[in-house]
Amino acid sequence: MKGIKFFYITCSKKKEAHKIAELLVKKKLVACANIIQNVDSVFNWKGKITKEKEVLIVGKTMNKNVQKVIQSVKKLHSYEVPCVIFFDIKNGNVDFLKWIIKSV
């Protein structure tokens, strides 16, 4: 099955992650979103090594929705440059993959 994507988005707070995840599901841009709290992140931002606790949103969508997901996240997100990335899902439980396709 082609065009199925796994996505990864980081947020600063649980409330922000829930707001983004719920909007994406409600608009049928993603089939589902999982929220993972207490992620330790270390990154270089504006020349400084930064350590933060973040909240991670992961989930499933279709290639046709990638740009709409990015734009929706950018409108709601508190970060200047939010992390919104996608990976191809090449195989898995066929019934689950069909559910993703039907859900979006």
Image (cartoon, rainbow, N blue to C red):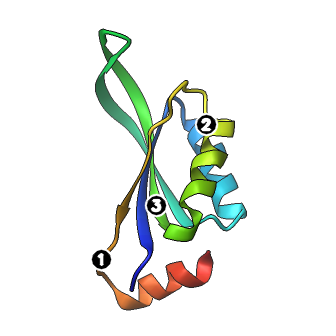
Question: Which mark identifies residue 16?
Answer: 2
> Mark 1 or 3, which is nearer the eye?
1
Q: Give me the residue at 30% from left, 77% from top.
A: 90
Could you classify mark 2 by the number of other residues whose Cα lies within 10 Å: few (under 14), some (14-19), or many (20 or more)? some
On screen, residue 30 above or below 81: below
Question: Which mark identifies residue 59?
Answer: 3
What's the distance in space between the residues labelled 3 and 2, CA to CA?
16 Å
* Labels 3 & 2 near each other (Cβ < 8 A): no
Could you classify mark 3 by the number of other residues whose Cα lies within 10 Å: few (under 14), some (14-19), or many (20 or more)? some
Depth order, front residue of 37/83: 83
Residue 11 place in picture, x, y as percent: 50, 35
Please name the amino acid that badge 3 sits on.
Answer: Gly
Residue 62 place in picture, x, y as percent: 51, 71
Image label count: 3
What's the distance in space between the residues labelled 1 and 3, CA to CA?
15 Å
On screen, residue 60 above or below 2: above
Q: Give me the residue at 32% from left, 15% from top.
A: 50
Question: Which mark identifies residue 22?
Answer: none
Q: Which residue is mark 1?
A: 90
**Residue at the extreme top of the image, as rendered:** 48
Q: Earlier in the sequence, mark 1 or mark 3?
A: 3
Q: Earlier in the sequence, mark 2 or mark 1?
A: 2
Which of the 4 image quadrants contains residue 58? bottom left
Please name the amino acid that badge 2 sits on.
Answer: Glu
Depth order, front residue of 32/70: 70
**Residue at the extreme bottom of the image, as rendered:** 95
